[in-house]
Amino acid sequence: MTIILVIAGLALLVFVHEAGHFLFAKLFKMRVEEFGFGFPPRLFGKKIGKTLYSVNLIPFGGFVKLFGEEGETKSKDGFQNQPFRKRLPVLIAGVCMNFVIGWLLFSIVFMVGAPRHLAIADVSSNSPAATAGAQSGDIITEASIGGMRLADPIDATAFINGVKASLTSEVTLTVLRGTESYTFSMEKRENPPIGEGALGVGLAEVGFDSQPFFQALLTGLKEAWGALVLIAVSLFRLIVGIFTTPGILKEVAGPVGIVFLASQATALGFVYFLQLLALISVNLVVINLIPFPALDGGRILFLLIEKIKGSPVPRKIELAVNGIGFAALLVLMVLVTVQDITRFWK
């Protein structure tokens, strides 16, 4: 059931993106040949006016087919015959919709509030926690420290002080990892390396109280914008790192990895799943704005070149570049998916 929920959430984000293109094309009275939910083969469809609304077999998002998008046409409602001031909004409408959905999802999260937990943010190598089997991302649901027992939600200060004050060296932790629960026993160190602590774990308190409606909307907007900036900066560093840091792509998660992480988030509570969906939606904004062929950013780049030079890029060149770009994206997706499978399904 969790996997179905995750796939449905991701499909919704892609569908909303395509709905943005569709709505703005309709707004500017461009002819939309087909607006489909999912990807072919087609299951059924209904034509209303000049647009075919279809439901397709592969339920991952959707697509919009604009009349005249793939070639020249003399019809006034063809995409290529529209002025720059109309085509540009249609191209950026998808990412705008993703940002709005990310904002609204963040706002819902802040309205509802998130259950508080104590999470393991980092595990130092060769530490007692690492030897016991603890991992970054584990949620501590119970801790036995000497004669003291702490239960979820655990206060970070109480946990740290308990470890320091305990007269016995053994610490037992029960953690939630995805949907599985694990229990570890470890011996605290008397003289740990500087900055690591007796157990060798970095801790993070997650969760927050609910906010009133309008405050949540404002906080959600700030969170969405902050995530957008952070993702853009991180992506830039990743691109630079590809040429300067060997093996950096091993840190990248693809579709399979996203499903796995979303499943883990769902196990913590539905609100955490919504929070992750919000982050993914904002991430789609940044990814799609990259000026790379086959992405919205690549199409926007061609449109800007046309505006600057006063004439369109030859159609054959644009199709060839987009075809190469699409093939490159498919290859990258396959490689990252294989990496995800080997990393998350051991």
Image (spheres, grey):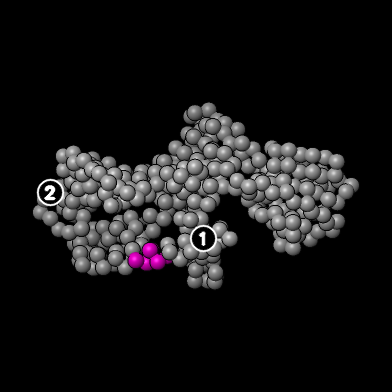
Give the residue type at disc 1: Asp
Q: Determine crowd level at label 2: few under 14, some 14-19, many 20+ residues with C-alpha closer than 10 A.
A: few
Residue highlighted by disc 2: 76
Q: Determine crowd level at label 1: few under 14, some 14-19, many 20+ residues with C-alpha closer than 10 A.
A: many
Query: Magenta stretch mostly in which secondary structure?
Result: helix
Indicate the position of residue 15 as horizontal and vertical percent values. 35, 45
Indicate the position of residue 213 as horizontal and vertical percent values. 49, 28
Residue at image x 46%, y 49%? 280
- Compared with 327, 32 (above or below) is above
What stretch of residues is rendered in magenta?
327-332
Q: Is residue 224 visible?
A: no
Quarter of the picture holding the C terminus: bottom right
- Compared with 289, 318 (above or below) is below
Q: Is residue 226 magenta?
A: no
Residue highlighted by disc 1: 340
Indicate the position of residue 269 as horizontal and vertical percent values. 57, 39
